[in-house]
């Protein structure tokens, strides 16, 4: 990943996604569809570390928090608008045309990236061959980074581990809201829309006032309030109580994501960021699958309400412990938003 132009990798992933989305209407069976989805997931796996690294290369350190805040705002807005546009297009045209339009916009995104500057000077002769030895070497480099940057690794991996709890609760969300709380499908759809509105409002305020918020407090307040929202959700008994919890977690989730993203980009060197991000995502994916299977098994053995409550409370407690490590005065240097040398 780090041996190639991040801009070109992003362009290729957009083109690959565009082509394979175009093929979905022609899928003759489920095996073909699952094969396409696997390719799309692989392309996304290449896209995420490449885009994160390219942003860090392209955006100056002192402007990254503002950029990530605006990006959170646009992403949250898309979360609200995307289903409405997709549903309207399917209603007006057809599923096939909607998919082809989606593919077309991926292609447009790839074309627009050609207008962004190429910030990396990649020597093609120096690009190593992809072998088992090279993969092991890359793992060694990432391990060395984690050993030499224990606090940065602790913060980001700690964030990943805490977010796995939210992933597990989200996976049980439909069953919990409809079978335990008793919401209808219409209530659930409305609930998701209201959550998205909370995210949009939070992201808008953050994009406007991002310079007023300390990076450390963005992470801590965002994490604690988001987990508090999940706790309200876990104890909910009605549509109104779930809405309160979801609005809180949606509102503050953007603070957490923008803060962690900025912290990560500021503390991981760009020449290893692609490899480090890929390994972290691999760890996250493996942990998510194992934890989700475990929670699904536990939920079958005991009451689902109790399972969600325990997850939320553990997540809330972890967020307080995690925030203490972030607010330590000795670690303040890791959250500097300029080029002042970090203090260990």
Image (cartoon, rainbow, N blue to C red):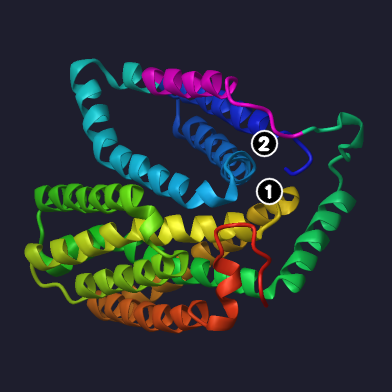
Lateral position of residue 329 relative to residue 220, left or right:
right
Residues marked 2 and 1 touching at CB (< 8 Å)? yes
Question: Between residues 148 and 313, which one lies in front from this camera angle?
Answer: 148
Separation of residues labelled 2 and 1 (CA atoms): 9 Å
Mark 1, Cα crowd under 10 Å, few <14 / some 14-19 / many 20+, is many
Q: Is residue 87 visible?
A: yes
Question: Between residues 10 and 330, which one lies in front from this camera angle?
Answer: 330
Q: Earlier in the sequence, mark 2 or mark 1?
A: 2
When asked about the image quadrant of residue 182, the answer is bottom left
Q: Can you give x and y, in whole percent of width and height, for residue 86 in the image?
A: 27, 28
At x 75%, y 49%, the residue is: 271
**Numbered disc 1: secondary structure:** helix
At x 37%, y 18%, the residue is: 101
Per the picture, the main secondary structure of the magenta-coloured stretch is: helix
Question: Between residues 84 and 226, which one lies in front from this camera angle?
Answer: 226
Identify whether 217 is placed above or below 322.
above
Q: Can you give x and y, in whole percent of width and height, for residue 275 in the image?
A: 71, 52
> Disc 1 marks which residue?
274
Identify whether 86 is placed above or below 161.
above
Mark 2, Cα crowd under 10 Å, few <14 / some 14-19 / many 20+, is many
Q: Which corner quadrant holds the C terminus?
A: bottom right
At x 16%, y 60%, the residue is: 178
Lateral position of residue 137 relative to residue 143, left or right:
right
Identify whether 136 is placed above or below 48.
below
Q: Can you give x and y, in whole percent of width and height, for residue 286 in the image?
A: 58, 62
Q: Which corner quadrant holds the N terminus?
A: top right
The question of residue 105 being in magenta is answered with yes
> Disc 2 marks which residue?
6
Identify whether 329 is placed above or below 63.
below
**Numbered disc 2: secondary structure:** helix
When asked about the image quadrant of residue 294, the answer is bottom left
Range of magenta residues: 100-120
């Amino acid at each position: 990943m780090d041996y190639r132009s991040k801009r070109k990798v992003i362009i290729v992933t957009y083109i690959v996604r565009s082509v394979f989305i175009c093929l979905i209407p022609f899928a003759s069976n489920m095996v073909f569809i699952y094969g396409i989805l696997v390719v799309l997931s692989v392309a996304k796996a290449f896209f995420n570390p490449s885009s994160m690294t390219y942003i860090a290369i392209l955006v100056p350190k002192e402007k990254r928090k503002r950029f990530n805040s605006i990006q959170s705002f646009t992403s949250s807005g898309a979360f609200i608008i995307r289903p409405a546009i997709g549903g309207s297009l399917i209603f007006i045209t057809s599923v096939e045309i909607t998919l082809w339009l989606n593919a077309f916009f991926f292609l447009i995104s790839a074309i627009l990236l050609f207008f962004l500057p190429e910030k990396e000077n990649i020597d093609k002769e120096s690009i190593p061959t992809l072998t088992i030895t090279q993969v092991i070497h890359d793992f060694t480099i990432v391990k060395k980074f984690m050993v030499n940057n224990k606090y940065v690794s602790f913060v980001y991996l700690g964030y990943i581990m805490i977010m796995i709890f939210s992933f597990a609760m989200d996976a049980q969300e439909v069953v919990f809201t409809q079978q335990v709380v008793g919401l209808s499908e219409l209530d659930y759809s409305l609930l998701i829309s209201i959550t998205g509105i909370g995210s949009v409002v939070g992201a808008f305020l953050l994009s406007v006032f991002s310079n007023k918020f300390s990076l450390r407090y963005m992470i801590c307040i965002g994490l604690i309030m988001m987990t508090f929202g999940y706790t309200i959700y876990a104890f909910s008994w009605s549509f109104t109580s779930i809405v309160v919890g979801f609005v809180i977690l949606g509102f503050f989730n953007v603070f957490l994501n923008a803060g962690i993203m900025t912290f990560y980009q500021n503390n991981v060197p760009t020449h290893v960021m692609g490899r480090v991000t890929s390994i972290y995502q691999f760890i996250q994916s493996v942990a998510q699958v194992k934890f989700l299977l475990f929670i699904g098994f536990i939920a079958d053995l005991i009451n689902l309400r109790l399972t969600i409550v325990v997850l939320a409370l553990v997540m809330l407690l972890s967020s307080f412990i995690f925030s203490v490590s972030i607010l330590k005065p000795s670690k303040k240097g890791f959250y500097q938003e300029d080029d002042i040398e970090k203090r260990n």
